[in-house]
Amino acid sequence: MALDASAMTASPGTAAKPPRTRPPGVWVQGWRRFRHNTTGMLGLSLVCLVVAVAVIGPFVVHYDPNDQSAMIKFGAKSAPSLQHLLGTDRMGYDVLSRIVYGAPTALAVGLGTMLVASVIGITVGGISGYAGGMVDELLMRFTEFFLVIPVFIIILAVVRLFGIVVVGTPLESIPYLNLMTIVFLLGLFGWPPIARLVRAELLRLKQMEFVEAARCIGTLRRDILLRHILPNALPSIVVVVALGIGGAILAEAMVSFLGFGDPKAISWGQLLYFNYEALKVAPWASVAPGAAIFITALGFNLLADGLADAFNPRLKQ
Amino acid sequence: MGIFRYIIRRLIFSVGLVFGVSLIIFFIINAIGNPIEILLAERPGITPEAIEAMSRYYGLDQPAPTRYAIWLWNILHLDFGTSIIYNQPVGGMLVAWGWETLKIQVPAILLALAIATFVAVTAATRQYSRVDFSVMTGALLGHSLPGFFVGIILILIFAYWLGWFPSYGAYSTRNMLWNSALADSIWHMVLPIAMLAFFNTATLTLLMRSNMVDVLRNDYIMAARASGLPERKVVYGHALRNAFIPVLTYLAILFGLMLGTAPVTETVFTWPGLGYLYITAIQQLDYPIIMAESMAITIMLVGATLLTDIAYVLIDPRIRLE
């Protein structure tokens, strides 16, 4: 005790003072814990694998994804061989190169969806948690509404019907319009978990001492929100977003699998849709995209799991 | 707040939900204009008079708000209109196709619940053991496996390679198994149920295990053990009951998820259920079916949520009604 006190009083002036370092922030602390988390690291490596395939893959594969020449040379639906590592599908495409070119699509779908969902979710949750009272009550009911409705079924109907509305309008010329519609819809219906989380975090952090301290020294409201509350809420948001990316990729795959996907985009769900009827003859053309979806979804799920453990160590115990 | 007021409040909210969804669906379908015109646009020999007559037959000549009111009024009288493609009353179709959907989904969720309970209890009572670790790993992997991928693998192995079960349909068109309609029907149900049960088991196991672990740490468990109750009674009689409460709410979510993704399940197995009907209806713009089905699924979903909400309060007196 006495030692502590003397050290404290002595430290300001003495030359023996160690160089002042900033204490590690939320992210550094989180990463230190994350490094020792087996599931999290496994998830991160799977995600890195998918990203690497998306970035490097297109330069490595031999076949153009739109190359149907196997129709003539080897025949469609040929089994995996040295020429075609994952075989060819029923349209004569090389399965491996279709899978590789599907990776950027999947990542774009996941990120795009979560971008839309985060913008809406953070806005709604932020307003709800900050305003409180009647506004909060109304917004939360609204959020609950979006949580209960059968989203997938509505998305299917909208994608199909929007495709009809667009015909003959200038919108038709936008590339990948169909895919963008799906992404936008997935985001539009995917924000409630984020809004709920942001609201809960805001309510929790509003009570914290450091926020009170900031208020005491006269920090502007905007600065309290943006510089004190938001950075501390971000780790939790990142967890939900990571989880959401996996979910969005899966959802897009399901929409495409049912035949409502973008016919011009190369996506794994689309591959399944084209090849599923030939499952008996060319199983590799259906199993490969299915496995790709599984690995990606698993990667993001494990990553989210590990991040949740790393950022909220209290939750684990 | 009394329990009756709570139930009534939830009920009103649920009705509002169903209402909201009906508005969304109606708005979307109206955005495309007259579906009859689109359906008949590419057929030669259809005169504008014929299109007009058909539109009048289906009541499409009325303005949109009137049509919505008529549609809502009819639905309240359980009249869902007539399918354009099948030319049958939609209400009867919903019952017939809905039965096929529930036939695989209800057994699947019950089966999953039974397996998950057993596995989760086993894992939770041996926390951090090798059994626990493998159960958790398996459940985490299974939780991320897309349902349709499991279905594809099941079909490949059990239908194509081993030839034990049929790969599609709910009935054989000829040569029924053992000449019995019941056996034949169950034979077709095996693979779809296995796929749905697989998905639900993984998710339920994850949830149940963490609940069990939490509950087993409580003082009353130690008290029960100290009073000399057999371990089996402590785990299944005392702990499991309390671990079960959060699972109850989750059952409604799982059920909703299964109903919502029925189109995928039923496409994988070419199963003649609501999901399959919905997909064909969307493709062919059979709008009475699209509207009625999205309504039916919403009502089932909201109903399940409502039931669990009420059951939740009835089972657990600690839950505060706000």
Image: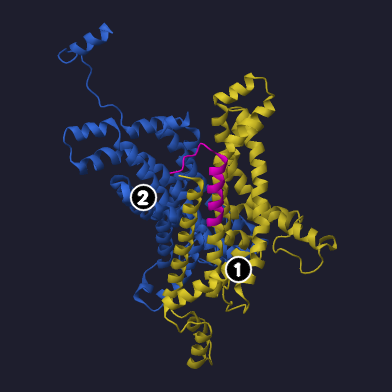
Chain colours: A blue, B yellow
Q: Is residue A295 left or right of residue B122?
A: left
Quadrant assignment, res B271: bottom right
For mark 1, give the secondary structure.
helix
Q: Residue furthest left?
A: A13
Residue at x-position 33% and y-position 40%: A203
Pick the residue in front: B247 or B258: B247
Crowdedness near tag 2: few (<14), some (14–19) or many (≥20) residues, C-alpha within 10 Å: some
Q: Is residue A292 visible?
A: no
Give B288 or A306, whichever is nearer the viewer.
B288
Quarter of the image that includes the N terminus of chain B = top left
Q: Position of residue A308 (x, y in %)?
A: 43, 37
Towards the viewer: A43 or B219: B219
Residue A312, position in %: x, y? Answer: 41, 33
Query: Which label sits in the foreground, 1 or 2?
Result: 2
Q: Read off the magenta span.
A: B302-322
Q: Which residue is mark 2?
A: A137
